[in-house]
Amino acid sequence: MELQRVLAKDSRAAMDQVHKLYGQDALVISNKRAKNKTELIVAVDLKSGADEALEEIQVQTKKSSHKGMTAPITSFDEVMESKIFATEDVNKDNENLIEDLENDNSKNIEEAEMREAKEIVSLVKSELSIMRREILLAQQLMTWPGIEVVSHKVQPLIKALSETSISLSLKTLITSVISDTTNIEDAIEKITEIVSANFESVELLESMSGYHLFAGSPGVGKTSMIAKLALTKAAEIGEANVAIVSLRDNRIGAWNQIQLLSGQVGVDSYKANNEESLKIILQELSNKKLVLIDTSGAESLFVNSLKIQNIDLKKHLIISADCSEAAIARYFENNETWNSLLISKYSETVSVWPVINALMNKSTPLSIANENADLQTPLKNLKIRDLVVKNLKNMQLSLV
């Protein structure tokens, strides 16, 4: 294999040029902007070069024979025999190679299926654990007066909360706190204060620099969130100072998506197949002010333990606004700590009580919210107060 450099006005034109020159199977290992153009680094098979070299040798042999050099005479039977046995050897080698590739593919598929099965089992266990906890708490609270202790003007708010996915323990706490309020506005303010007291926020957009890794379930919107972060920070510190790295994401089309989004944003993109190659790439990118690392959703539960020597790697968790409490809880089962939590698919109409339930009393601060995958829709700093107020006011409107 050898590396070839392709320049074009944009990513699409560059890929067309790559396919025309090196075929549809050409491996693109780098995509970046250079002098207002898109530069692709392509790994090219040396087979074509070997064929040219062979032709040149044959030409030289013919020239030598014309100069009077005599070559050993081989009979027709000897030539045929050598070709037959050589073909058999080649076929045998090809069969062995195909068998090895099939074994590798089968092994990779089995490992992926095993990881997926473990995730499903873990999710089911988490759901059952939460259900058992809620049932036990409900049994303990059977004699508690509950909604009767609240003013009749505030009772509709408690009833509306009961229809959401708010946990029974949080509902009990809220009911106790607002027991002495006489109107919904004061009740909302008290609820906001009690919930906000259990959360922290960090303005990640303003302070982000260095190396940042993002984890989350498949389909949660990690890649589009990272692309928006790159776009936002590139406008602030310059495109040349930002890079995106894809780590161990072997899904079909995943790398092409990273390359396309990086080209649209105008930043460099790199692919790391394992921790060792990631370490090498990050060392090479030490001159960048910001490096964003996208990870495979299938391995999102394991990346928190990733450590790279001499690299201060900050790790963030991305969840969707409609995520279940059990799905979030899995990322904190072994007391994992995250530098911040980002919420995708966020809108005022989505109830985020499961998110609040799962993160109560956790030390992970909230940081950024993303409404959709459109690059032109800006990211926003996320504060728990805004989150709670929006959800409560949505319920209040339904009560009027």
Image (cartoon, rainbow, N blue to C red):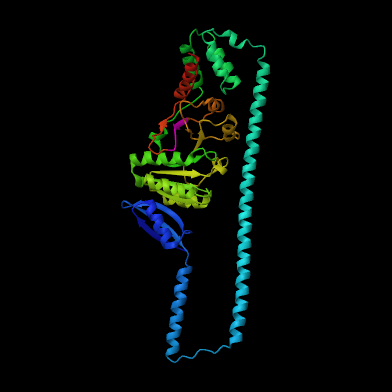
- Where 313 sits versus 29, above or below? above
**Location of residue 74 (image quadrant):** bottom right
Image location (x, y in percent) of residue 7: 35, 57
Query: Residue 307 colored magenta?
Result: no
**Residue toward you, 301 or 28:** 28
Image location (x, y in percent) of residue 68: 44, 92
- Where 335 sits versus 103, above or below? above
> Can residue 161 be seen here?
yes
Give the residue drawn at x 60%, y 64%.
97
**Residue toward you, 144 or 45:** 45
> Can residue 288 be seen here?
no
**Residue toward you, 284 or 69:** 69
Give the residue drawn at x 44%, y 62%.
22
- Where 15 sits versus 387, above or below? below
Image: magenta residue range: 366-373
Give the residue drawn at x 56%, y 25%.
357
Total numbered labels: 0
- For the view shown, which residue lies furthest in the left direction? 35
Residue 338 placement, left or right of 380: right
Image location (x, y in percent) of residue 150: 55, 9
Residue 233 placement, left or right of 168: left
- Where 20 sits versus 334, above or below? below
Give the residue drawn at x 41%, y 39%.
228
Image location (x, y in percent) of residue 225: 45, 38
